Image (cartoon, rainbow, N blue to C red):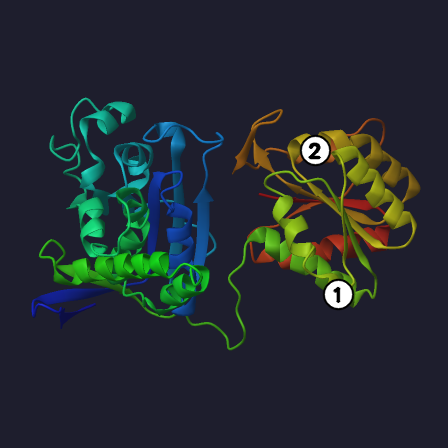
Amino acid sequence: MSTSTQDQSGTSKQVIKIDSATVRFAGDSGDGMQLAGTQMTNTSALAGNDVATFPDFPAEIRAPRGTLAGVSGFQVHFASTDIYTPGDRLDALVAMNPAALKTNLGDLDRGGILVVNEDAFDKKSLEQAGYPTSPLEDGSLDAYRLFKVPMTKLTRAALDGLGLGQKEADRCRNFFAMGLMYWMYGRSLSATQRFIESKFGSKPQIADANLRALRAGRNYGETTDAFVSSYQVDKASLAPGKYRNMTGNDALAWGMVAAAKMSNQELFLGSYPITPASDILHELSRFKNFGVRTFQAEDEIAAMTATVGAAFAGAMSITTSSGPGIALKGEAMGLAVMLELPMVIINIQRGGPSTGLPTKTEQSDLYQAIYGRNGECPMPVIAARSPADCFDTAQEAWRIAVRFMTPVMLLSD
């Protein structure tokens, strides 16, 4: 279904109704792609859509700018129906430089929307990404709906007169890209405007710059002849109630607090920070008003033995970790099995063996969870099927632990 609207210039543009869309923002680490994706997610949730997301961070500390290893991305899938994945293929890709294009183009559907910052496609950046010629000019992108947008120049023009340096102005390009995609999918600017005013309230010049860039991106979509249509995703048919946009880690934390309240026990978390499980420690540390006690140990072994001690004393005891940390906890887990102590061991799986890839996730630790202890040391292992399911799975893990007086391993990714 489609309708026609008039933009600010009086030109008629088509609005096409679709059931869902999967959009990915991609650029260098430091380009603000995580912020862009997070804000579009929040805006889509407030618009009444069901949402699922997939943030993608480089595993390196900070790869050189413009290189393939340094590309950061954020994918958001929003729909008018229930969705359970972040999406397998992209309907739209925003690429801030050649490296982002090369890294992510393979996930974009043929005929998909490809928005690129053409100002970033200089000779040096093309060479860093491994392009012998510019893909914007050699016809290699003919299978996609390519939109070459001079985001850097347009952002600088929008911020002219604010007194910002070139480097500071260029940091606002992510808000320009946000504004453009908000126009393309009929998103409101209001939630992001409130975020900017709150986040940068103590820096009015920066707040004004980001607001200008956001509005400039939207205005560009409305007024340029390059875009002849935009898209509308209606609200999802959701049952009345209060909905929250949260990650799987946050849902696990909330689920554990709920389980503690339902069982009328104090919740104790013994943990050592490790990506990607640290968010649970951070979230639970906020719930002291619910009697939650969090203990950040000096290492994984100390965290596990503290969890064993708290369980022995009668607390609802949990620990969190990832693959390398689970390997270190093995001996103390065996002790907990011998003592028949109820507890939950949350394993947020990361990619690769040994230290692996801390910012990448993988579903490869099932055998470690089942067999990764010496001697005869059985332990129930359960897994969450989605971020929302993490809340219920956390409670189910504790129910099993108490009923059968045993540690339970809960897998997530």
Q: Which residue is mark 1?
A: 290
**Residue at the (64%, 58%) spot, across then down:** 391
Secondary-structure class at tag 2: helix
**Which residue type does callout 1 highlight?**
Phe
Is residue 372 in sight in this rendering?
A: no
Question: Distance from label 1 to label 2 (Cα)?
Answer: 27 Å
Residue denoted by label 2: 325
Question: Which part of the image, by quadrant, shows the N terminus?
Answer: bottom left
**Towards the viewer: 135 or 388:** 135
- In the figure, 339 relative to 80: above or below? above
Is residue 323 rendered to the left or right of residue 151? right
Q: Amino acid at mark 2?
A: Gly
Q: Earlier in the sequence, mark 1 or mark 2?
A: 1
Whether residue 250 can be seen here: yes
Q: Residue furthest bottom?
A: 240
Vertical comparison of 358 with 115: above or below: above
The spot of residue 23 in percent (x, y) is 33, 51
Q: Is residue 348 left or right of residue 80?
A: right
Residue at 32% x, 66% y is 189
- Residue neighbourhood size for the residue with mark 2, other residues' Cα within 10 Å, grouped as few (<14), some (14–19), many (≥20): many
Looking at the image, residue 137 lies above or below residue 318:
above
| SS class, disc 1 | helix
The quarter of the picture where residue 358 lies is: top right
Q: Residues within 10 Å of mark 1 (few under 14, many from 20)?
A: some
Q: Position of residue 141 (x, y in %)?
A: 17, 36
How many numbered marks have been drawn onto this rendered protein structure?
2
Q: Nearer the viewer, residue 256 or 68?
A: 68
